[in-house]
Amino acid sequence: MSNTSSSAAEPVARAWPDGIAEDEAGIQWDFLHFLRATAVNKVAGLTREQAAATPLPSSPRMSALGVLKHLTAVERWWLSIEAGGAELPSLWKGSPDPSWDLTDDDDPRSVVEAYRAEWALAESSLAGMSPGERARRSGKFTVRWVLAHVVQETARHTGHLDVLRELADGTVGE
């Protein structure tokens, strides 16, 4: 795999959610959009080697690319399959959770493209559903709960990406 800029991910625009939220589901989606963009931007500009590095001894499978692959699996399972009832394969087959593992074909551009493609699937799967509706797969959760869960999971892992990016090239902040 080459470390050329052609495998680098490009930053995406992000907007802080409006402080005067009028719509419960809308504000959750706004925060998820912001967090998704932040996660992608933490990988933008990194080489494959930097993005695949696992610098934390206590988390030997945690790389920036692995975090994004995991977030892709989170969105697939919770938003598309569980809440939306989409007939898609889970990205979580096996134990330990394989969503953290990289293949030789994984580079910043390909992993970000897969993550961004999952956003469209998730939003399509939930189109027309209200926050109080039950998840279509199991009925054990409301859409409200699933969205809140995915927002907190994405926020948590975006914090991991902050640390991984700083260790990769010293970049901090936004």
Image: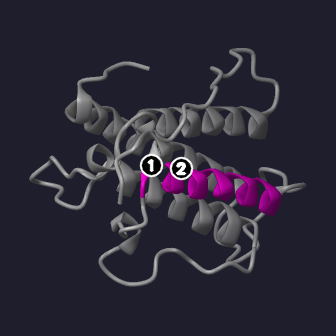
* Mark 2 to mark 1 CA distance (whole Å): 6 Å
x and y percentages locating residue 71 in the rendered image = 49, 55
x and y percentages locating residue 15 in the rendered image = 65, 22
Q: Quadrant of residue 125?
A: bottom right
Secondary-structure class at tag 1: helix
Nearest to the observer: residue 33 or residue 1: 1
Nearest to the observer: residue 68 or residue 108: 108
Amino acid under label 2?
A: Val
Q: Quadrant of residue 140?
A: bottom right
Residue marked by disc 2:
112
Look at 27% across and 43% down and name the residue there: 50
Nearest to the observer: residue 158 or residue 106: 106
Which residues are the magenta region? 107-126
Residue marked by disc 1:
108
**Which residue is at the far bottom?**
94
Question: Going by the image, does 26 lie left or right of 167?
Answer: right
Q: How is the image coloured?
A: one colour
Classify the position of the C terminus by image quarter.
Answer: top left
Question: Going by the image, does 51 lie left or right of 89?
Answer: left
Secondary-structure class at tag 2: helix
Look at 46% across and 35% down and name the residue there: 44
Classify the position of the N terminus by image quarter.
Answer: bottom left
Amino acid under label 1?
A: Pro
Do tag 2 and tag 1 residues touch (Cβ < 8 Å)?
A: yes
